[in-house]
């Protein structure tokens, strides 16, 4: 499993080439990026140069975010489609195979109606991504406070997300599986063992404070190994089902970190070293 | 538009051949039926004989109900599929082109999850029906008391049902459009004018008591023309958009009617005559 | 049915606004256009202005062509998708509801493999167009010389095209129905009567020389009423099934016409007048 | 990878319970079966008893054949659907997860039209199987003599089959990968390495005579290790991509084998032992 970074937890890493450079320096094999910054990078430097740079640095782009706005109204969704296509085209030139979006566990909309509309929209996004060899990863969100943050419950665990993925009915749609959400939904080793590697598009890693699980806040995360999530079980579970993709750190915090990107990358490197070793992984 | 009967409002009409006979005698061109009774009828009499009888009586089968149990758990759904296939096969031998099911406006399940599961199940039902040349009509249900009867809101009007139909994404899925639900969702002439005829799989007609629309009860219906629904607008609207299918009477009542089937069929014939004439239809 | 023009048969009609102007002047209610010229027109004049101009001239855009190259390799297809999205977005701003492409009756590729690939590609095109409220019209091509022009037979008539449309499985895909192809595939009144109006996305009209039908050349067409196609049956058939969309003239010729656009538009106006009157249409 | 048997190459193995018994006795962990014989077995013995028997014998059902006739006309296809549903229901009770059908490399039909129709039909089969947790495996057929056996070429290799699987667009559809067809299509280690384990639904193993590959006949197969196919590369390749499913022997021969089922099962056991050991597999 490839160690990766997102910008969440890394501070000011600068433009994408700097971020890649930084990740490379601290032993990471992947970074998550915005599709638009990839598009601009390619426009500025040429796709061959960018591919060469990534290869030299031994860093791949782990995933991009989903550009289309599928949560609001139809006009907003339509308006995002040209962006989605442009970003998918750019990302595919760099060999990116994952595009991700999160799904909140409650909504102010009529949940059934929103689900019907979202199914149609995400299926179209998956259709388009498929043409570029990219998979769509859907992230279920676990922290309990978000389950009642909006009026009606929405999908709240891996199981219901997998059912939705079945309904979307595209073979290029799977889970973004995040340690924080696995933990806050009471996930076990058995839950991971039930998954097939090909159901997982992307993985996020992080840690949680030692408070009752029902009180864990979504944007108050720790670096891997600094909290109470059983990341040994998490990593071993993923390894056992044959997942060989990216495990990207994502540390959402109430305030941006104050340390330099170097210091944070070094801290992240140590964090990964610790949890990987503890799990018996290289 | 073909005048049709369901058994709701007709009392004890006996086996399907008697029901067809009765409908024919009182000027109806269609009856709704259970798929299973068609299957048994064909098994007993032969499909050619049954087709001949229907032709002689100038009565077609307007629609059958959806046999598969799509609202409960997965095992129940699976168990219903052989029945669905058998009934579709039987119905198609009699030229039936519509199969219908209703969708309640609230649910005790997580509405998003139920929607995801129901989308997958109804798509499969539509796939199977399509192989037999049959369309699937989904009926939205309007009475307000049912919107809070169960814990979470579900689809509650024609507009959200049409969005769901888009999501199901099969060209053989459309609306079962019922005057009672049109009325109780505040439907207007404009709402009908926005529909295309090919979006309507089947139509139900009936009437509502003169109580505030928010207090109209689902199972307390009147015969067409005996209540306050503007059936002239309803029928003219359907005619104007080019709907030429069956308009079947469905009178749900708290107690079964006490009159004979003959008396009720005669009453229905008068009811149709009145509302069709008022709408300027043949 | 709205009388329409394509540029084929009209000579040098100039930029799109001139073409609309010309069409309007000679009594046409629609012109077919390239998506890209609509996009550029909107970029130059603003979509509100363009809509206003079209409304003032009482001319709609009948259909645009399908921008994505679905017939060649996967790279070419991918490269066309941003164009498709951009043109669909532009077209939808002008209320365009049809996008069309033709399907040749033979191919040098393995026909089964090409069909499999083309099905996937056109489904994605239809998915994207659907998001913009646009339908995809597929044109079967009738002239016999094209059936053996390439190595293997491909789809050669309306019936097999309708089967393909079923397979594509999107409710926004239908036929581009062209009088020339109807004639050269031996089409009859009964063949039109079997169609539903909602299966037809767009119509082309033209006429054929008085040679054996097997010798009719695809790019040697006449103006409506100047040849041997029974356009009375064609137009009456479409009218009877309830088609109310655009009937656009498309006259492919070995050499570009030498007359002025005005002269050709006048000739076309007369041609339409003749065949519409003969068919008893307004 | 689980060693399995089909009846092809085993002679008269008797009813399914005897066949399972025989397979178990000679060290096989799977047998392929007809859905109908499973259905009848369950009807006679009860599904719990059958499951118990299979568990006791340590034999699973590797795959069933696809009951629906998707190659002929629409009526034949429809008529097979009740059978498909019944067999899927029966098979799912025994934990069967694979259902397979072969695809001939040429056809007398218009290949494009047949492909369009077959895509729709197999998608429906996959839809139904999916409801029962069963995958559909499509087998490409390699022997060259079958490529010109019928009038028009159809799909002739793994690559085009995978394209078709993409087009069918169901995540439960994949390859039945047969050593004989891999060999006769010039398959290499690299071709297997490009596959993902989840793209393979089922595997067949056998061997080919030492004649030019273009002259290899489909129904003239040898037992594994008795011919010229590089089964070491074949098995290692499958193992390396993580395939852990059934590898079932299928020996089609011009005449039925004359030996007893015991003798043939023993010979098969030796054949598997030899090729597995040579490939360094348990």
Image: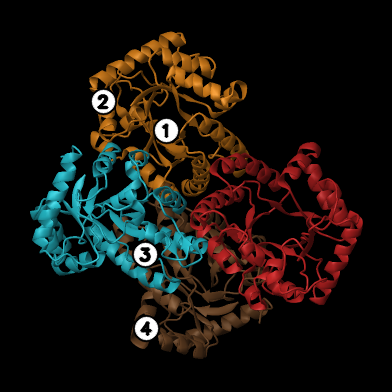
Chain colours: A orange, B brown, C red, D cyan
**Mark 4 = which residue?**
B41
Question: Same chain for marks 4 and 2?
Answer: no
Q: Is residue A179 visible?
A: yes
Residue B263 at what x, y percent from top left? 48, 87
Q: Dots 3 and 2: beta carbons under 8 Å?
A: no
Q: Dots 4 and 3: beta carbons under 8 Å?
A: no
Chain bearing tag 3 is B
Chain bearing tag 4 is B
| Cα distance in 3D space between marks 1 and 4 | 55 Å
Chain bearing tag 1 is A
> Judging from the image, what secondary structure is the residue with disc 1 in?
helix
**Mark 3 = which residue?**
B68
Q: Quadrant of residue C11?
A: bottom right
Which of label 1 and label 4 is nearer to you?
A: 4
> Judging from the image, what secondary structure is the residue with disc 3 in?
loop
Question: Same chain for marks 1 and 4?
Answer: no
Which is more toward the observer, B48 or D141? Answer: D141
Which is more toward the observer, B75 or C9? Answer: C9
Which is more toward the observer, B47 or D111? Answer: D111
Q: Residue at x 80, y 73 (%)?
A: C281
**Mark 1 = which residue?**
A146
């Amino acid at each position: 499993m490839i160690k990766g970074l997102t910008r969440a937890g890394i501070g000011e890493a600068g433009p994408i080439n700097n971020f890649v450079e930084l990740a490379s320096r601290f032993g990471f094999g992947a970074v998550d990026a915005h599709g638009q910054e990839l598009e601009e990078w390619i426009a500025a430097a040429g796709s061959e140069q960018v591919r060469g740079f990534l290869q030299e640095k031994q860093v791949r782009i782990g995933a991009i975010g989903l550009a289309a706005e599928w949560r609001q109204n139809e006009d907003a969704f339509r308006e995002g489609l040209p962006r989605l296509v442009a970003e998918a085209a750019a990302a595919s030139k760099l060999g990116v195979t994952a595009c991700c979006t999160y799904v909140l566990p409650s909504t102010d909309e009529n949940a059934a109606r929103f689900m019907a509309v979202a199914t149609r929209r995400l299926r179209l996004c998956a259709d388009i991504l498929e043409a570029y060899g990219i998979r769509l990863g859907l992230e279920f969100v676990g922290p309990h406070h978000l389950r009642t943050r909006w009026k009606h419950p929405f999908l709240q665990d891996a199981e219901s997300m997998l059912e939705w993925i079945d309904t979307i009915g595209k073979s290029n749609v799977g889970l973004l599986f995040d340690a924080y959400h696995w933990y806050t939904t009471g996930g076990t080793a058995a839950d991971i063992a039930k998954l097939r590697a090909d159901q997982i598009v992307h993985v996020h890693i992080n840690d949680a404070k030692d408070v009752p699980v029902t009180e864990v806040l979504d944007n108050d995360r720790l670096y891997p190994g600094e909290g109470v999530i059983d990341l040994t079980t998490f990593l071993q579970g993923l390894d056992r089902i044959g997942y060989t993709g990216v495990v990207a750190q994502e540390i959402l915090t109430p305030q941006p970190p104050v340390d330099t990107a170097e210091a944070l990358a070094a801290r992240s490197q140590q964090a990964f070293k610790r949890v990987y070793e503890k799990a018996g992984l290289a």
